[in-house]
Amino acid sequence: MTTTQVTSAGSAGLMRGASVEAPSSGWAVPVRGDIGTLPWCRLRRVTEYIQQNLDKELRLADLAALVFMSPYHFARLFKCSTGVPPHRFVVRQRIAGARAFLATQELSIAQISRMVGFRTPSHFTTVFRRVAGVTPRGYRTGTLRENRPGGEGGCDGSH
């Protein structure tokens, strides 16, 4: 086996100066290295689409088609760009949207769960607890207590 240098192999120089062990047959051994990231304009297009369509079902294939990529390649580049896989990103965005709605009492938790793309309130509660560490009702109670005049909450002075 010999060691060779691979410089700028394939698409837009995504592998830079990676050493590879090449067998004596002359075939290059695949290198697992830097696979790159999504171009900024494509990442922005996907994230804006996600924000605008949180109430809808967002499939990996649909997100990938939005930026003209295969689902597998899109998922890999999206994770390299954002640090999280597409599904986890979507779930976090849904929970962030739910937090904003939960800060007011105008909507029920069931209505909020549908508005941010969950089919059932129970699934919403499960996912919310997993991400935020508290149930939606607990979050709402804590948020409303903090936003009440007088700060801490608790007794309302009528006792």
Image (cartoon, helix red, strand yellow):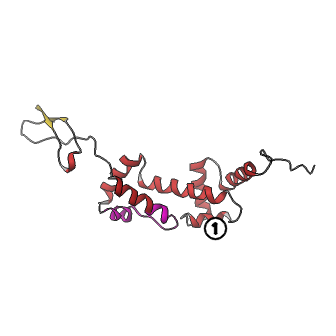
Which quadrant of the view contains residue 44? bottom left
Residue in the image at 66% along x and 58% along y? 102
Q: Position of residue 45 (x, y in %)?
A: 39, 60
Residue in the image at 59% along x and 54% along y? 128
Is residue 46 among the parts visible in the rendering? yes
Give the residue furthest to the right: 159
Which quadrant of the view contains residue 24? top left
Residue in the image at 47% along x and 67% along y? 57
Residue 118: say if magenta: no
The total of numbered circles placed on residues is: 1
Left or right: 2, with 122 as reference point: left
* Amino acid found under the numbered disc labelled 1: Gln
Q: Residues within 10 Å of mark 1 (few under 14, many from 20)?
A: some
Q: Where are the magenta residues, as a range?
A: 49-67
The relative height of residue 155 versus residue 65 in the rendered view (above or below) is above
Along the line of sight, the residue nearer the viewer: 149 or 87: 149
Is residue 125 among the parts visible in the rendering? no
Q: Position of residue 106 (x, y in %)?
A: 70, 65
Give the residue furthest to the left: 25
Residue in the image at 41% along x and 45% along y? 83
Q: Secondary structure at mark 1?
A: helix
Q: Position of residue 33 (x, y in %)?
A: 26, 40
Q: Position of residue 37 (x, y in %)?
A: 32, 48
Q: Which residue is mark 1?
A: 111
Left or right: 101, with 50 as reference point: right
